[in-house]
Image (cartoon, rainbow, N blue to C red):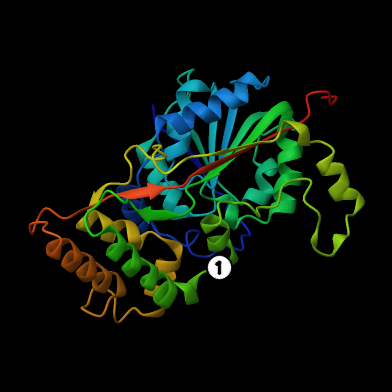
Amino acid sequence: MAASHSSNASGPKVSEQTFSSYDQSQGQKYVQARHDYSPHVYQAVFEQHTSTGGRPDTLLDVGCGPGLVARALAPRFAHVIGLDPSEGMLAVASSLGGTSSTGDPIRWERGAAEDLDKLPGLAPASVDLITAANAAHWFDMPPFWAAAARALRPGGSVAIWTNGDIRAHPSMPAAARIQAAMDRHFEVNLRPHMTPGNQLVMDGYVDLPLPWTPTPGGDTNDAASAVAQQFDKARFVRKDWAADEDFFVSNAEVDLDGFEKMMATMSAQTRWNQANPELVGTDKDVVKILRREIENALHEAGVDKGKEVLKGSVLGVLLVVKKRSDLDQ
């Protein structure tokens, strides 16, 4: 059965312009380079949702990209929708397909996270679980929470996660030298192209605004208060993954070709590429310079040519926010 793909003709209004502008070719490279999340992550999301009264009926994956999360969780839900502002990402998601537990195709929709409740045919208070994997740092969070409050069924959940910082695993040869090279790369080459969203990820979402987070200046209007009151602050959960726990399907072990491809999918690296198109792919490409530094470090540590492998420690985090279950539907 073919996957459903619907696109709003006028296009969504989004502030993030890097991934949302991806074409299908870039989307293909993204899905090929990115590791999927560990089954333990998906299990933690599902168990946290259902153990607190959440139903396995309708899942809405926001910022779905090429659809990794929607497809992984689809067998557990009767109806699944993937939402993303990028036509290129959605084209890849649609080509890969996926079906729910009832055999229905995943529905792929183009739109912004802040307008998730405006999807065609989506009734108010009809969504059971909203997920956002490595995407919430691009959202305008107050309108996102307002839209989530309108879309969620009482007792529904919002599960947000990110991989946080990725470090060279200490068990790897020349780990300290490789980490120093990566730190220089981030500070010198990528820092000028980083956004506040990138910093939220590096900090493990500690400052990601939640429904009850005070607005800057301390002013809280009636609308924001009404949204906050629909979510159960007492049942908020934050789960952190330790460096030795798998957050991805593998502990981010890649050869150097895979490392290059993965680096190219980072938003700050994408913006560096856009700012320096004449250097991309040349000896002055900053990723290729970094690769040469890593190769030299590994070779001097005794690793044979052709056997260079990088292993990372991933500090992931999952946030789960519940809509109050005592609200009238």
Q: Position of residue 323 (x, y in %)?
A: 74, 32
Left-right relation of 137 to 169? right
Left-right relation of 293 to 35? left
Which of the pair 293/57 is nearer the observer?
Answer: 293
Numbered circles on residues, count: 1
Q: Position of residue 212 (x, y in %)?
A: 79, 46
Q: Residue at x 53, y 65 (%)?
A: 17
Q: Position of residue 200 (x, y in %)?
A: 58, 58
Q: Mark 1 — residue?
A: 195
Q: Residue at x 16, y 68 (%)?
A: 296
Q: Amino acid at mark 1?
A: Thr
Q: For residue 243, say whether it is visible.
A: yes
Which of the pair 277/183 is nearer the observer?
Answer: 183
Q: Secondary structure at mark 1?
A: loop
The residue most toward the right is 222
Q: Position of residue 31 (x, y in %)?
A: 35, 48
Q: Quadrant of the N terminus?
A: top left
Q: Residue at x 78, y 24 (%)?
A: 325
Left-right relation of 195 to 224? left
Q: Residue at x 87, y 49 (%)?
A: 223
Name which quarter of the figure residue 45 lies in: top right
Q: For residue 11, say whether it is visible.
A: no
